[in-house]
Image (cartoon, grey):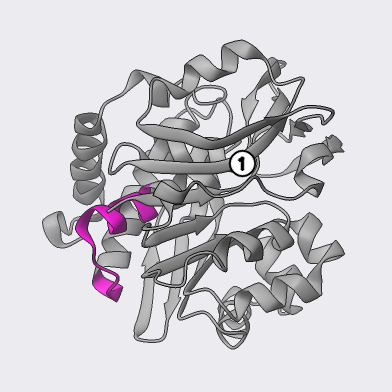
Amino acid sequence: MSLIVTGSIGIDTVETPDGQKAESVLGGSSIYFAAGASFFTSVRLVAAVGEDFPAHFHKQFQRFDVCTDGLEERAGSKTFRWHGRYHANMNDRDTLDVQVNVLGEALPPVPDHYRDSKYIFLANTHPAGQLELLDQFPDRKLVVADTMDLWIDTEPGLLKQLLGKVDGFVLNDSEAKQLTGESNVIKAADAVLAMGPRFVVVKKGEHGAILRHQDGTGVLPAYPADAVIDPTGAGDSFASGMMGYLASVDDVSINAIRRAMAYGTVVASYTIEKFSTDRLAEIERSHIDQRLDEFAGHLDIGAGI
């Protein structure tokens, strides 16, 4: 089934502890998500960029099965920009500069031929935009949202309103603690569940992810990556594999979500091997399936993922 996503499209500058620096590369939550999910199903994008959006970035969409009919290049606006520097552990980072720009504006209109979408991912962007998109799909089957510390700080009311309308919520462990005030990640996940979603996935970076669902719990380690070049977009890539798989099998059961999380972990393991979406542009679905089999071997549970 078709999968629709809205979220940020950005121009990123990334610094790593080994001295590497990628300047003004394509980034943003919806970019990483759309690229990763396109290995599983067709993806429809709703997002806006500014008039400063580099023309050559459009070519990168052509590598992936992403419909950009909902992408608007807005005159008089500037594209979202983020500049970050990672610490030596590659889990923590400092945001050196963030310019919200077009993300603070209304979303572009949803194309009519997008309106039959049943699977919706609200990637990280302003909660007002997430709510706006959500309300246009009354026949949705599964809606999952992501967020970030900025919106938890500045838009807690809208974010809690959103949580009352979605089926699933994805966030990292520090965001879960920030949102709920709970220092224990399990208690934090349960506190998020109490706000409305049927399930919550808490990402823990190199320590994997935890699923808290109304029907049970799941715990999954990260893929044992031996080299991390750039972890930017890893969380969005995790969500892309998860949602892409669920849309492809049209199954939203807890067992399907557990397997989907494994696919998400594998997609994220490719993303971190290069800057931006460069590594994803080099692989095919067969590479993802092969690495999933290897991952299952590490877990010693074979096809039971």
**Residue at 63% over, 37% down:** 28
Q: Does 58 appear above or below 36?
A: above
Q: Does 72 appear above or below 254?
A: above
Residue 271: percent from left, percent from top: 46, 32
Single out the residue that lies furthest toward the front: 112
Quadrant for residue 139, please give it: bottom left
| Image quarter in which the N terminus is found | bottom left
Q: Amino acid at mark 1?
A: Ala
In the image, residue 251 lies in the stretch drawn in magenta: yes
Judge from the rendering whether residue 212 lies leftward or rightward of residue 192; answer left or right: left
| Image quarter in which the C terminus is found | bottom left
The answer to whether residue 183 of the structure is visible from this angle is no
Judge from the rendering whether residue 185 lies leftward or rightward of residue 21; answer left or right: left
- Residue hosting label 1: 47
**Residue at 71% over, 62% down:** 127
Quadrant for residue 250, please give it: bottom left
User: Is 226 or 209 nearer to us in this picture?
Assistant: 209
In the image, residue 118 lies in the stretch drawn in magenta: no
The stretch in magenta equals: 241-255
The answer to whether residue 153 of the structure is visible from this angle is yes
User: Is 219 or 101 nearer to us in this picture?
Assistant: 101
Quadrant for residue 229, please give it: top right
Residue 83: percent from left, percent from top: 79, 30
Look at the numbered disc 1 and give the secondary structure of its residue. strand
Residue 253: percent from left, percent from top: 27, 74
Residue 15: percent from left, percent from top: 73, 24
Judge from the rendering whether residue 248 lies leftward or rightward of residue 221; answer left or right: left
User: Is 137 or 95 nearer to us in this picture?
Assistant: 137
Q: Does 11 appear above or below 19?
A: below
Single out the residue that lies furthest toward the left: 303
Q: Does 45 appear above or below 301?
A: above
The crowding category of the residue bearing disc 1, from other C-alpha atoms within 10 Å (few below 14, some 14 to 19, many at least 20), is many
